[in-house]
Image: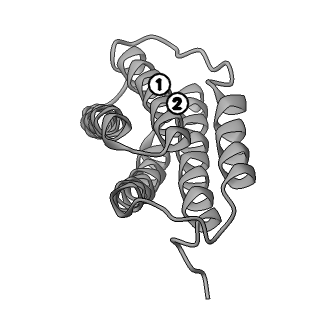
């Protein structure tokens, strides 16, 4: 059984995941670059899985963790980096959408830190750690997409 504090924090994370699904889906429809559309759609799918996992926890069920789409995430990131070398003309709106999602992922990953530390149940912590790792992978995918197009200079 989860405490009231855990429940409130998990409900916050659930609303964050719902927002991610909405944003990734909307941005996939707005993006011009087909690879970015695919990346956004893949991430939207993973965020739906996160939302469902949080629902399971809130409903008193022990979530099952089965490597929710990690191969797809890495593949999307590598594919974007390989086929679009830096210097290619990039749609400014695609850059803006990607940067917005990167900021969103940074926030959500950080919020998971707090929730993880507040959870009493080891299995719930493990499930949330898994989700957080995927959120960090999303951030890396977005960073790599921007970086590969010269849209996120790190110097």
Quadrant where the C terminus sits is bottom right
Residue 55 x, y percent position in the rendering: 35, 18
Residue 43 x, y percent position in the rendering: 49, 35
Q: Residue at x 54, y 63 (%)?
A: 146
Q: Secondary structure at mark 2?
A: helix
Colour scheme of the rendered structure: one colour
Q: Residue at x 65, y 39 (%)?
A: 76
Count the numbered circles shown: 2
Q: Residue at x 61, y 35 (%)?
A: 130
The dot on residue 42 is 2
Residue 122 x, y percent position in the rendering: 59, 31
Residue under label 1 = 45
Marks 1 and 2, Cα distance to the nearest angstrom? 5 Å
Residue 139 versus residue 149 in the image, above or below: above
**In the drawing, does residue 106 fall left or right of residue 22?**
right
Tell me the quarter of the picture where residue 51 sits.
top left
Q: Residue at x 59, y 14 (%)?
A: 64
**In the drawing, does residue 50 fall left or right of residue 22?**
right
Q: Residues within 10 Å of mark 2 (few under 14, many from 20)?
A: some
Residue 24 versus residue 142 in the image, above or below: above
């Amino acid at each position: 059984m989860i405490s009231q504090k855990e429940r409130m924090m998990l409900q916050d994370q659930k609303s964050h995941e719902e927002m991610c699904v909405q944003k990734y889906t909307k941005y996939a429809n707005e993006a011009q670059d087909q690879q970015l559309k695919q990346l956004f759609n893949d991430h939207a799918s993973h965020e739906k899985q996160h939302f469902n996992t949080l629902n399971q926890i809130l409903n008193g069920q022990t979530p099952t963790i089965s490597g929710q789409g990690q191969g797809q995430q890495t593949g999307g990131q590598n594919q974007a980096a390989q086929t679009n070398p830096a210097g290619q003309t990039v749609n400014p709106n695609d850059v803006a959408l990607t940067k917005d999602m990167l900021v969103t992922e940074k926030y959500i990953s950080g919020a998971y830190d707090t929730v993880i530390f507040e959870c009493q149940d080891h299995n719930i912590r493990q499930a949330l750690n898994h989700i957080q790792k995927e959120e960090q992978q999303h951030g890396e995918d977005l960073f790599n997409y921007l970086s590969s197009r010269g849209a996120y200079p790190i110097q």
